[in-house]
Every structure is written in structure tokens, then in C-alpha cells.
Amino acid sequence: MSCARVKQCSAASIGATERHNERLNTDYANVNVVQERIPLNVHYRSPPSSYMDTLRTMEAAGTVSTRGLRKDATLFDEIIIDVNTMYFERNGGYEYAKKFYEEAYHFLEKKFGSEYVVAAVMHADEINKAATSDLGKDVYHYHLHAVVIPVVDKDILWSKRCKDPALRGTVRETIHQVSHSKKWASNIPLKDEQGQPVLRSNGKPKYRPSYSILQDELVAHMQEHGFTNFQRGELGSTRENLTSLQYQIEKDKERLANIQERVEVAQTKYETAWDVRKTESEIDDMGKKTITGKYTVSKEDYKQLTALAKEGITSRQEIHKLNEDISLYKKQYIDCKYELRDTQSAYAALRRRCEPFLQALKYFPQFAKGFAEKIADLLEHREAQQKKEREEAKRNPHRASARRQDDQDLER
């Protein structure tokens, strides 16, 4: 499962994002960061200075403009691209993840413009405790943090006070305006299961969330470049993004529930075994040996012994029946195994015989369709002819016998 999360960052919050992404902290809210592995993080784009200083430099050069923005406005978008850990484990681990996220980085360059991607780094230093526990080896959670500046082209018009009347209302200059809301504006209508537009209470159409469109575009881009067999996140999900710590707490809760379930199963097995062991010990301690060598038991012990003896006889019969059932099921399994093998062989032979037609169907579908329809007509004609002959044979059996003899002579 893949997801692309977007986090808005202002001038006040971008510092914390940078410290986390570039591993500038001395300790981390995410307790799964293994600091010895920080050198393995892969930086696809490193800014020449801090994120904020990079923006100021770009603004001074006229590459971007923050004109008219509030003090707390969104200046950066952090995009976190995350894919299920087991996808990388199945395909080559760390080396495969580096190639995967390098292509994801190129997607972001194409989507937002290379000059507006401030930083991009793949984290390879966060251990996945659940996968580590399941696989019995250290497994790491590879994901990409990218910081981009949301920029749209904005036309600045000459005002009505312009001395030249011909210039009034025309474009004076086009600036690259930093604007999160305009960059993420969506104009794709949201549709229901029947393909009809979804409307708001005021009758106006709803539009697909831009973040959902981003996920579609990401998956399509990655698949076009050879990275397949992974799925996008849940379509239409309204789940809020989680912090790394919240995400880990949620995962640890799932692991704890799984461990508790396994403990309960083990406890049940232990209690059953302990009951059996306790009963065996009680039987060994029953009775007292007399001078004559015989044993005497109490009335309560005698009742328990006879009950256990009856239960043992019944259990033997049940075990014998179960063993017979096992033998029967084993035989049925072997029979089914051979039948399956024969069926697979027959299917393979049929597939080989039909291969020319399948190839024709693939490359010449209209011709193959016409051929199949022609065969169907011939079979229908043959079936009708045979039906007619059977009806004639019922009415005149001697004539039908003579016709069959003639057919056999012709075949010879």
C-alpha cells in the first residue's frame, strides 16, 4: 500500500521539519530512529543553506514571490511518500528502495518544477519493529520526505491609475507566487458510483481532493517506470495524517493485540496440559499398600478411578474412529492430488492446441471473432443434421442402417 501525505509548513514550523528530515536533532520523537544508520539516508536534493534561507535567496532572485502573504501563511509543503515495508523486502530491500524513491523524487520534480523542490531525502534509519518481530531480522521502514514550494503563475495588471490608457488592465508582469491554496485547487468533479456528479447542499459540485489526485498521479508514474505490484492508499479515505510517534503507537497497539492473542492461545494449551499432568499425579498418589501387598482406596478415589476408566474406554473408541477418518481423508487427498495433476496436464495440452487461436484473438480479434462465429454456425448445422437423422432413424430404422453402412464404406 502506498500513500502520499502533504503537510503544510509556515515560517514558524519549517525549522522543526528541517531538523527532522535532515537529522539535525540530538533526539527524536520517533523512538524507532537508529542513529547508527543515519549515514545510510539518501539525499536526492540537499539545499545550499537552511530551507528558510533557500526561500529568501529565491525570493531575492525573483524566482518566487511571497508578496501579500500573511505572516502565518503556508510557505512550504512537505510531501511524505510511504510504501508498505514488505514491498521493499520482497524486491531487494535498501537498494531497491533507493531506486524507487529516486524515481518518486523525479515525479515531484515534474509535478512541482525542479527549481521549487528544496530538499528530498529517503529515510533508511527507522526500524519497523512489527516486521522485525515477524521476520526474525532487522527490517527498516523506507520512506521519502520532500519539501517543495507551492508556486503558481500570477499576472499583475496595470492599474486604472496608469498614465497610459492603453496599458490599463493589461498584464504588467507575471510573478511566481507562493500559494498553497491555489497550487492545490482542484477542478476535477467528484462522482458517485453511478458516475454522476456529487453536489453540495447548495447545489454546487464537489471536487476531488487534490491529495487524492496526487496519489493517482504518483502510482501511474511509478508503474510507467517499471515499479509495479504496489497499490495506492485507500481511495476517498478521510483519515487524518498521523505524526511519526502517533503512527508508531498505533502500530505498537496492533502488535500488542497480536501478542496478547498468542499468549491466550498458549495459556489455553498450558492449562490443558497442566490439568492432564495434575490428574496423572493424583492417580499416582491414590491408594495405600497393605501388608498383604494389596492396595486400598477411599470411596472418592474409587469413584474417580472408575469414571476415568470409562472415559478412557470411550476415548479409545473415538481415537480409533478418528484415525480411520484420517486414513480416509488422506486417501481422498491423494486421489484429489492426482486428479488435479491430470486436470492440469489436460489444461496444458488444451492450451497448446488452442494457442494459435489465442494468438489470433490477441492480434487479429475481428478475424478470430468471425472464425469462431463461423465454427459455431457449422456446429449448429451439424447438430441439426444429426438430430434430423436420429428422427429419420426412428421412423425408418432399415434405411438408416443402410446409410450408416454406406458411410462406413466411404470411410474405407
Image: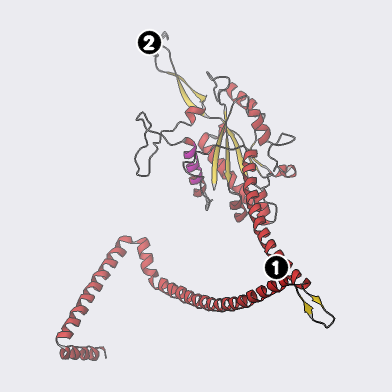
Cβ atoms at labels 2 and 1 below 8 Å apart: no
- Say which of marks 2 and 1 sits in front: 1
* Amino acid under disc 2: Pro
Q: Which of disc 1 and disc 2 is earlier in sequence?
A: 2
> Which residue is labeled 2 in the image?
165
At label 1, which amino acid type do we have?
A: Val
What crowding class fits label 2: few (fewer than 14 Cα within 10 Å), some (14-19), or many (20 or more)? few
- Residue 262 location, quadrant: bottom right
Q: Is residue 401 left or right of residue 122?
A: left
Q: How is the image coloured?
A: secondary structure
Disc sitting over residue 276 in the figure: 1
State the CA–CA distance, disc 2 to disc 1: 103 Å
Residue at the front extreme?
299
Up/down of 148 relative to 314, above or below: above
Question: How many numbered dots are placed on residues in this image?
Answer: 2
User: Quick one: SS at disc 2?
Assistant: loop
Q: Quadrant of the C terminus?
A: bottom left
Find the magenta span and give its range.
211-219
Q: Nearer the viewer, residue 346 or 246?
A: 246
Residue 346 highlighted magenta (yes or no): no
Relative placement, left or right, of 101 versus 375 is: right
Most common secondary structure along the magenta stretch: helix
One can see residue 14 in this view? yes
